Amino acid sequence: MWWLSLRRRPPFSCPPNPISGGSISTDLRVNERIRVPEVRLVGPSGEQVGIVRIEDALRLAAEADLDLVEVAPQARPPVCRLMDFGKFKYEAAQKARESRRNQTNTVIKEMKLRPKIDQHDYDTKKGHVVRFLKAGDKVKITIMFRGREQHRPELGFRLLQKLAADVEDLGFIESNARQDGRNMTMVLGPHKKKSEAQAEVKAEKAVTTAAREAEREAEAVAEKVHREEHQKTAPPKKPRRRSENLDPDMEA
């Protein structure tokens, strides 16, 4: 590159290259705001130019119609890079918005069971747990002991293990069963992220909506065909005859 023709000075020790990885802050000193006598210059494609005077670095930036951006002020000398700073800030803002859009608040649902729950109630509770895990939510399972049941903690432990095994395709044990006063708790985590689960739900809704619309269209077509067939098979209507009692003058 044309800026490589600059006379280089022996390299100074500095921290690892901040350009090779990680993110660059948008709150940086740019161009004339950089007030140091010399900088370690990096080209727009990441190539190392070397240590140059600040005047030369600014001149190169102006000739290339780029900005001189101080990306590592803590280095000695500071590291500066040639880049389109406006474009960089725009892309950084886009990435930040996309990151915030993909972030979802962690929701922990709770399901309470009794150690001697009957099968029907168990199936109902399990259905709720399945729905929560499919939606990408964590589920806290609480076994509530009463009276003499407190002396049989193994009942609650076996119930928690059974529930975890029944939903293992959708979730995993994130927090093992533990005694919490009179209760025993366990936390199940979903295999899928919240964003992935929401995307699947939207896709399923879209498929269902499309299927319903196709069904309605098919019914409308079938109804139209039925009417047309009925019109073809129906006997022709007899033409109206003039009444014999009409006044001849009226017929004239």
Image (cartoon, grey):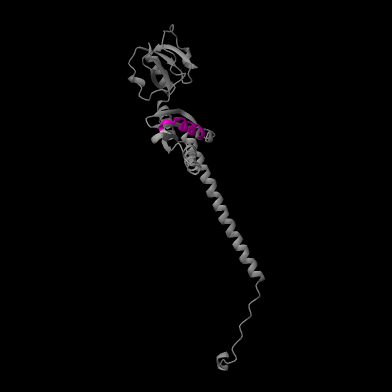
In the image, 35 versus 120, the foreground residue is 120
Q: Is residue 191 visible?
A: no
Residue 123's spot in the image, x, y percent?
50, 42
Q: Is residue 3 visible?
A: yes
Farthest front residue?
Answer: 148
Residue 87's spot in the image, x, y percent?
42, 29
In the image, 161 versus 2, the foreground residue is 161
Residue 152 in magenta?
yes
Magenta residues, dominant SS class:
helix
In the image, 221 versus 42, the foreground residue is 221
Residue 12's spot in the image, x, y percent?
41, 7
Residue 92 in magenta?
no
Residue 244's spot in the image, x, y percent?
60, 91
In what quadrant of the picture does the C terminus appear? bottom right
User: Where 11 falls versus 156 (above or below)?
Assistant: above
Q: Is residue 104 left or right of residue 246?
A: left
In the image, 224 versus 4, the foreground residue is 224
User: Where 242 falls versus 39 (above or below)?
Assistant: below
Give the magenta range. Answer: 150-162
Q: Is residue 180 left or right of residue 232?
A: left
